Image (tube, rainbow, N blue to C red):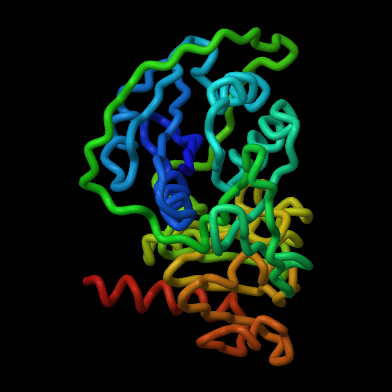
Amino acid sequence: MIQVLIVAEHANGRLNQSTAKCVSCALALGEGAIDIAVLAADCAPVATEAAALQGVRRVLTLERPENSEPLAAVYAPQIAALAKGYTHLLGPSTTYGKDLMPRVAALLGVGQISDVMAAESAYRFLRPVYAGNALVTVEAAAGQIVVATVRTASFQPAAGGGQASIERAVVEVTLPVHTRFLSRTQAAAGRPDLQTATRVVSGGRALASAENFKLLYGLADALGAAVGASRAAVDAGYVPNELQVGQTGKIIAPELYVALGISGAIQHLTGIKDARTIVAVNKDSEAPIFEVADIGLVGDLFQVVPELERLLRAERT
């Protein structure tokens, strides 16, 4: 029987929605048992949320002071030890999962299947290649544990209402000391998380400066949206790397994606191909972004954005 262990992603005592999407992927593997591993200094709040996901049998908590920060080097040996006896080990294909899961796969001596977007069976998976321009079916050996990251944009989160048991787990492993937590720098609070937001406003190279990029924040606030950026905007220093959307950034699937001054390079389109509605504003009528946009406006974003924000705020009042 299939035995699946999912590594929970969480922050500030809240379970990230990516974990619920991993549960949906696990359910698609076929009949079996699904467990979730929570690593933290205080697991209780996150474990309670995880236990409420439908389809989960139990939540295993690894609670120790060293787990207070999600350091991949510290988490990996604990997860590798806990994973013994399971047939599948899943983590989200987010920044967190991309950092952690390859280390776990290496410790277990197996290859990793990255960006699973569909499960055809317990050992056959669909994943994108060539920046999403092609899809390939890969098959894993049934005789060894399958370590995979789940493309969260391709799955809906599992429903709540579950009643999984919560159990304390203990693993005897030596934790590395070559990596330690120093500090954390986070984006300004008050906006939705880019990875899970239902609405996203993104800017590109056309904004020309970090000061001009602030123009997007007012529109994002009016929409209740997260803020993103193209790689060109990040490389130019307009915004930090954590806001990058695309093949080498975050893969997202919002209900609404507003692209402002983004030309639409294939690497960027890879990150938004699962967005429900794409709105594009660009001065160049030949920009590739218009080929995928549901709504396109050829115009100067420095004129369009303030007007859109004004109309949105007027509608609310």
| Position above or below: 297 against 269 | below
Q: Is residue 263 above or below residue 239?
A: below
Residue 298 image-quadrant placement: bottom right
Residue sitting nearer the eye, 309 or 113: 113
Residue under the image location 51 percent in, 52 percent down: 195
Whether residue 207 is visible to the viewer of this picture, yes or no, is: no
Write the residue at 58% across / 47% down.
Answer: 94
Q: Position of residue 160 (x, y in %)?
A: 25, 48
Q: How many marks?
A: 0
Q: Residue at x 46, y 60 (%)?
A: 155
Q: Position of residue 45 (x, y in %)?
A: 30, 27
In the rendered image, which quarter is residue 225 located in? bottom left
The answer to whether one can see residue 174 in this image is yes
Q: Tell me: 277 left or right of 149.
A: left
Residue 103 is situated, as x and y percent measured from the top left of the image, at 71, 31
Horizontal and vertical percent position of residue 265 = 75, 73
Q: Residue at x 53, y 33 (%)?
A: 86
Between 149 and 314, the one nearer to me in the picture: 149
Which part of the image, by quadrant, shows the C terminus? bottom left
Q: Is residue 48 left or right of residue 303?
A: left
Above or below, 279 relative to 211: below
Instruction: Compare residues 55 and 19 and report the one nearer the observer.
Output: 55
